[in-house]
Image (spheres, grey):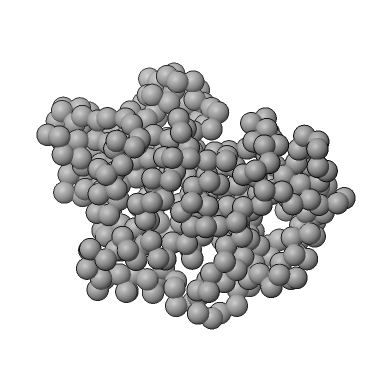
Amino acid sequence: MYIHSINPLSDSRWDDLVARHPRASVFHERGWLEALVRSYDYEPFVLTSTPPGKPLSDGIVLCRVSSWITGTRAVSLPFADHCEPLLNGTGECAEFMRWLRAECDRQHWKYVELRPLSWDEKSDCSLQPNRSYFFHTLDLTPPLEEIFRGLHKDSMQRRIRRAEKEGISYEVGSEELLDEFYRLVLITRRRHRLVPQPRSWFWNLIRSMGDNIRIRVARRNRSPIGAMLTLRHRSTVVYKYGCSDDKFHNLGSMPFLFWKLIEESKASGAREIDFGRTDLDHEGLITFKDRFGTTRRVLSYYRYPQAEKRGIAASWSPRAMRRVFTVLPDFVLPTIGRVLYRHMG
């Protein structure tokens, strides 16, 4: 098998493959790739066995991330919770992985990382599991009343009714809600002692994703108290980012927003909500997602080579960043995010 490398932003055959492949997701779409390029200057490429001039029969999309802090590597895909290789069988996998291993060694990349939703451990793909998460999905095919009964009675049903009783209002949009959404992002990231994503990332997602992106904002007395950003690909809605003002958590704004998302997604013909990945030790968030009646399974990322070399990147671990974060004033955090996030993909 001869492996070809193409640019998915200039070769329309990639769009055609994403539109028809059963394992394609919103993270394969041109819009996600364009936002990565505009925000962080990553270099997307697709590996395929299809020669020029013919419709693509397969493809693995990756981004080359170049960083003097975290090293140069190929990732499929940065900031995506998952990204399936769009192949037609396990037999193809070994050929593609052979090419990636050779290119990783030749280019002296730190590693190659794939983020598949599923992986045949028996296939000869020579990538090893590196990190694992929990992955939650909610089936929208049952009747809405049955879905509501599946919510945790105290943590979800009661809080949704509390929000409705308190007169919590909400609005759905995109660009016009970005400023309110981002203000809540800054509040939430400060609360969790995490560096906020740059505002330009969300703006570029809105520019690139078109009708496949939505921001929902919950308000009390016109003041935003909770928000979420979602994406959509075919019949799957992806919950990607959520944020809130903790002073109003007792009003149930986030369960209320999730229920509105469930109602509207089902009404629009969606069959599933992707709740995204969660760190295995993040018990609070795992419980929160479980209480929506979601199905949970393990999501693993795979790398070659498996072991990372220690160096300057070790000083940029999440724990180290949290220690630095505690002494930074609020006004510098967006600037820190603009500088750091391109090194973190």
The percent coordinates of residue 329 (x first, y second) are 22, 68
Q: Nearer the viewer, residue 175 or 341?
A: 175
94 with respect to 67 (left or right):
right
Identify the residue at the far right of this view. Answer: 1
- State left or right for residue 61 relative to residue 158: right
Name the side, left or right, on which 98 lies relative to 295.
Answer: right
Residue 196 showing in the rendered view:
yes
- Residue at 67% over, 37% down: 12
Q: Quadrant of residue 18?
A: top right
Q: Nearer the viewer, residue 74 or 269?
A: 74
Left/right of residue 344 with respect to residue 218 in the rendered view: right
- Please say whether residue 259 is visible from this viewpoint: no
Task: Please provide percent x and percent y for residue 30.
Answer: 57, 41
Q: Establish if 7 lies above or below 160.
A: below
**Image coordinates for residue 34, horizontal then vertical, percent:** 53, 46
As rendered, which of 134 and 25 lies closer to the eye?
Answer: 25
